[in-house]
Amino acid sequence: MDKIILVVLWIGLSAPLCLAQTVSGTITNPENQPIADANIAVLNSTEGTVSNIDGTFRLQLKNGKHTLQISEIGYATKVIEIVVTDSNPTLTIILEPATTQIDEVVVSALKREQKLQDVPIAVTSLNAKRLQETRSWNVNELTGIIPNYSATQLGVGFQGLQSIRGIQVFSENPAIATYVDGVNSLDIASGGLQFMDVERVEVLRGPQGTLYGRNALGGVINIITKKPTNKKSGFFESSVGNLGLQRHGFGFKSPLIPNELYFGIAVQHQYRDGFLTNSTEGAADPVLGQEGRRVGDESSLFGNVFLKWLPNSRWNATLNLKTQIDQSDASAFFVSVQDDQLALDNPDRIFLGRVGEHQRNLLNAAVAVNYEANTFKISSISAYQRVGLRFDDIDFFPQVPGQVFASYNEGEVGVMNKPQEVFSQEIRISSERKNTVLNYTAGSYYFNQTNYEPSTNTARIVNATTLDVFSQIGKNEGIALFGEVNYAFSKAFTATVGLRYEYENRKLIFSRFEEVNGDITFIDPRTEVSGNYDALLPKLALAFAINKNQNTYASYTRGFRAGGINGNLLPEGVSQTFEPEYSNNFEIGYKSNWLNNTLQLNLALFHIDWEDLQFLNSFGDFVFARTNVGDARSTGIELEAIAIPTKGVQLEANLGINDTEYKDFVLSRDVFNEALGEIETTLTDVSGNTLSNAPEHTLFLAGQYQFPVFKNYNVTLRGEFRNIGDAFSDIQNDLEIESYSLLNTLVTLSNGTYTLSAWMRNITDERYIAFGAPDTSFGRSTRISEPRTFGATLNIKF
């Protein structure tokens, strides 16, 4: 028996290469000059190589259809399909300068690599070059660039609320799923990774439940970082600017054993001063020395390590560790100005009795293993995520006595909360896509989460001896089975059918108690409540290729956000649990390339029915619980265009128009009637109101001109205009966020190895509401946007 096992292992680990064929080629520019160090990647595989000094390359590929992506600095990325047989001619690949042709973009939006223009969903992809051109360092800075996408700032870099097509969230469970190198961030406290050494960012607009499951209610953000290859490379990047900006990082990638073992590392530190000055005016409990303090300082340390192993042509494994530490001793976490007009009149001030501090520690660890057979591929991603958070002296309601909050852990205040921990496992099997008729992806997903959500594990500091403590422990686990099949009725017409089944069990253990000099008295006893939730998430898409440069599609997709449990003890007859939310997306789209790939035009029209929204309602005596209140609708159009009308000139235009409304949505709120001396419950029908944080439109216009100045050096002049339409922050449509416009500019001098950039964002110093209360029945808390920023960035590649 042992011998049999050894034989099987040997066959798997040393699979014969007799089916592999040698594919060779030459990469040149239009003047027939060889291009050295061009990267040749075989999509959906680990195969790849780099061109030699004479532009030649060789690959060992199995018989069948393969897709190659060829890229090099200064040239437009090209994607070609080849068919490998027993006899293969030498390939001649010509790369056009990036100043004369648009990149052919590859995405993994459907969990396999394919050309963006062939994907039958609305997706925007920003590669490293475009992230640098737009000076996008995190997801918040994608607002305006992505049609119908907005990110609401919450005072710290690692936490924000994202909205796509008006779909957003009112709790800790995101409505936009964020994946980093294939690993899902299940909680909003686990987001906010810096864009460091990123290969591309993909934004999938609309529900993506079939392949991505929970929390992909409004869409998905895929962040893919750069992986090590056979090519040794490195970089150093340094940025300085106003508000004390210091952002410095480096990275290095190299084969440890050529063609077998690879290593990569990237490290970055960022620090910036806050722009707010504190005033203790109006504070109920001001602390000496807090007047005039700066608020909003934050530093962030990020690290990313890769180890990649290719024992043979069939097996590969990647170990990835990411960590980020965010901290501040002048924190803007959880704080705001309590009135919107006061905030607009004083955009650089905040009114706190004391200035707090915070620290967030994030660790992501993942192991990805792939096995490539002749006709299928098996992929496994095992991931562990750990989030720790502490905060202290957070003056949440400055005008009310005893409303200072801090993290709490077993009798200690202001210390690190017990960590949130998530283990997840995804296994997929997919066809190798050599069959032009039928292809498939199927798999399973499991997660187990221990959740200490920060806003519900806190101590309210009543006075020097008394704490009002809220404690919640979430124990959640879920499993999903999914599959998607593509069938080509002809070369032009393809149908996709998918289905996912999700099951989730959630358990919450909660209590509230008063601690006086270490003695504990329970206000709400320790209570344990469980809930089970499941969902079927179908998908149907039809795609038709008008010709090789024009594609159309029509699709239906469904999204799901799990139900949950209220963490406060409710009166008899009021459910402690609430049901899931669902979104149904109907979409038609058109994607095209024109004029020898110098013009790209993509269009999408959509309609979303959002069902069973989870929101807080009153059940009398100022007892609030999250429940499924009502429905909503979102309808709109999205246009993306990019053009190179002449050499060196690039123009971009992205437009999103969004019409939204709440439906059958009635809020119940408690008010104290002073005349009667009793509490009354009022009902407010917000049906017909527009969705909160859903701008009427987003508009992005950009133009840049690149020209040579002396040998091997080019100058790029770039200007951007972003306009975000009118919106309301609150469900009552009472706190308006007026339309605003931003002008940005970038000037770059580069020879490909050394790049020096000077940039300015928000040239006109526009100040607008960056965050407003989602429900103004609880107040009108507001945060104003940051002022004009400017700086310089040096990037060195080696």
Image: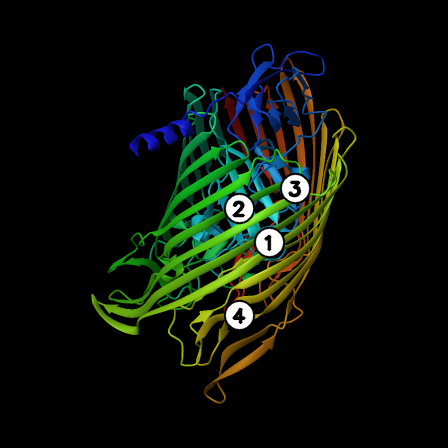
> SS class of the residue under badge 2?
strand
> SS class of the residue under badge 4?
strand
Let me know if residue 267 appears in the view: no
Residue sitting at the far top? 54
Residue 259 coordinates in the image, percent (x, y): 45, 20
Q: Is residue 188 above or below residue 304?
A: below
> Which amino acid, by three-letter code, is at mark 1?
Pro
The number of callouts visible is 4
Residue sitting at the far bottom? 676
Instruction: State the mark number for residue 349.
Output: none
> Which amino acid, by three-letter code, is at mark 4?
Asn
Q: Which residue is mark 2?
A: 442
Task: Name the front one of labels 3 and 4.
Answer: 3
Instruction: State the mark number for residue 628.
Output: 4
Residue 475 coordinates in the image, percent (x, y): 36, 59
* Mark 3 or mark 1, earlier in chain: 3
Residue 8 coordinates in the image, percent (x, y): 38, 31
* Residue at image coords 27%, 70%: 514
Left-right relation of 420 to 634: left
Instruction: State the mark number for residue 119.
Output: 3
Which one is nearer the viewer's eye here, 436 or 226? 436
* Mark 1 or mark 4, earlier in chain: 1
Characterize the local packing of mark 3: few (<14), some (14-19) or many (20 or more) Cα atoms within 10 angstroms.
Answer: many
* Mark 4 or mark 2, earlier in chain: 2
Task: Name the front one of labels 3 and 2.
Answer: 2
Characterize the local packing of mark 4: few (<14), some (14-19) or many (20 or more) Cα atoms within 10 angstroms.
Answer: many
> Which amino acid, by three-letter code, is at mark 3?
Val
